[in-house]
């Protein structure tokens, strides 16, 4: 894939993110039509579907040979994904749908592009706050054009860690997550929960906290934010400390290797299957 191809894909990614942001903003304060998916806490609205449809047609119209993985298309097909070496656009039309339904501002459009199974472009747009986070592999991460740098903290005791309850209501999963929340409160300066994996990763990229850990999310929730965080100098791993497997439905992100190691050692690691 040439530099020129990547430039073109990056420009298209930013432009569809802006268009997605407009759809989200227009619907934000209105009454939403809400449906549930895997659990009563796993929501979809007509706006999620409208954004995904628009993005799918824009991308495949421009790059007919590229592959597309979208949260809502997957919800309908129920398919498992196989990552190939082909350029693959991975999108979450509204990351933070529960926030969107409740008109809470932490909502984002997330778009990651993988080539040869590696993330090369990440765009997360938070339209209500007009925050455009972008990254290209090896070229740094930016917020509205300003370079991002993760926090320099190495001591877990000084770290603010973001984590989420997630949408699974399986009793064992909930118990393990509660156990982890107890552990995190005990070992860190505090925990936070913003309701959008993509935004959580961008917060770590921007130095707004030192780490983020979540079990049970999907490739479309985190692939763009993971590139943005790592291009800002953060460490992105599987929670056990191994390399991140993008289909494995879990992620650990920390501002430093020390905080990452500390987190990995104290947490109970949940196995939530793969995409
Ligand atoms: C959300 C994630 C969030 C997680 C929620 C949900 P969605 O994605 O970003 O981190 O805790 O359960 O999966 O469904 O709003 O795109």
Image (spheres, rainbow, N blue to C red):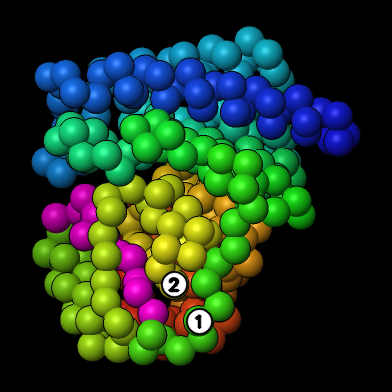
Asked whether 188 or 275 is in front, the reply is 188
Residue 109 falls inside the magenta stretch:
no
Residue 35 image offset from top left, x and y in percent: 16, 26
Q: Residue at x 47, y 53 (%)?
A: 202
Q: Which region of the structure is painted magenta?
A: 159-169
Disc 1 crowd rating (10 Å Cα; few below 14, some 14-19, many 20+) is some
Q: Residue at x 70, y 18 (%)?
A: 63
Q: Residue at x 44, y 72 (%)?
A: 210
Q: Which mark is residue 153?
A: 1
Residue 225 image offset from top left, x and y in percent: 51, 50
In-image side of 95 versus 171 (left or right): right
Q: In terms of image quadrants, where is residue 194?
A: bottom left
Residue 53 image offset from top left, x and y in percent: 43, 15
Residue indicated by mark 2 = 210
Q: Main secondary structure of the magenta part?
A: loop
Would residue 86 be seen by someone viewing this image from the given angle? yes
Would residue 251 be seen by someone viewing this image from the given angle? no
Q: Residue at x 50, y 59 (%)?
A: 206
């Amino acid at each position: 894939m040439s530099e020129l191809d990547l430039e073109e894909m990056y420009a298209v990614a930013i432009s569809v993110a802006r268009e997605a942001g407009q759809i989200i903003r227009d619907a934000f304060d209105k009454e939403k039509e809400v449906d549930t998916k895997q659990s009563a806490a796993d929501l979809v609205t007509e706006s999620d579907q409208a954004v995904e449809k628009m993005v799918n047609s824009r991308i495949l119209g421009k790059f007919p040979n590229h592959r597309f993985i979208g949260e809502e298309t997957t919800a309908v097909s129920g398919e498992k994904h196989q990552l190939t070496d082909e350029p693959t656009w991975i999108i979450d039309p509204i990351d933070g749908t529960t926030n969107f339904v409740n008109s809470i501002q932490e909502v984002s459009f997330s778009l990651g592009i993988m080539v040869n199974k590696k993330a090369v472009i990440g765009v997360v747009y938070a339209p209500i706050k007009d925050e455009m986070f972008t990254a290209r592999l090896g070229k740094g991460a930016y917020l509205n054009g300003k370079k991002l740098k993760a926090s320099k903290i190495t001591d877990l005791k000084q770290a603010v860690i973001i984590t989420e309850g997630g949408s699974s209501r399986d009793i064992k999963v909930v118990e393990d997550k509660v156990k982890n929340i107890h552990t995190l409160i005990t070992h860190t300066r505090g925990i936070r929960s913003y309701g959008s994996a993509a935004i959580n990763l961008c917060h770590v990229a921007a130095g707004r906290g030192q780490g983020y850990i979540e079990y049970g999310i999907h490739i479309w929730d985190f692939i763009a934010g993971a590139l943005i965080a790592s291009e800002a100098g953060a460490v992105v791993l599987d929670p056990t400390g191994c390399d991140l497997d993008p289909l494995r439905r879990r992620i650990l992100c920390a501002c430093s290797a020390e905080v990452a190691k500390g987190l990995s050692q104290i947490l109970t690691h949940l196995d939530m299957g793969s995409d």
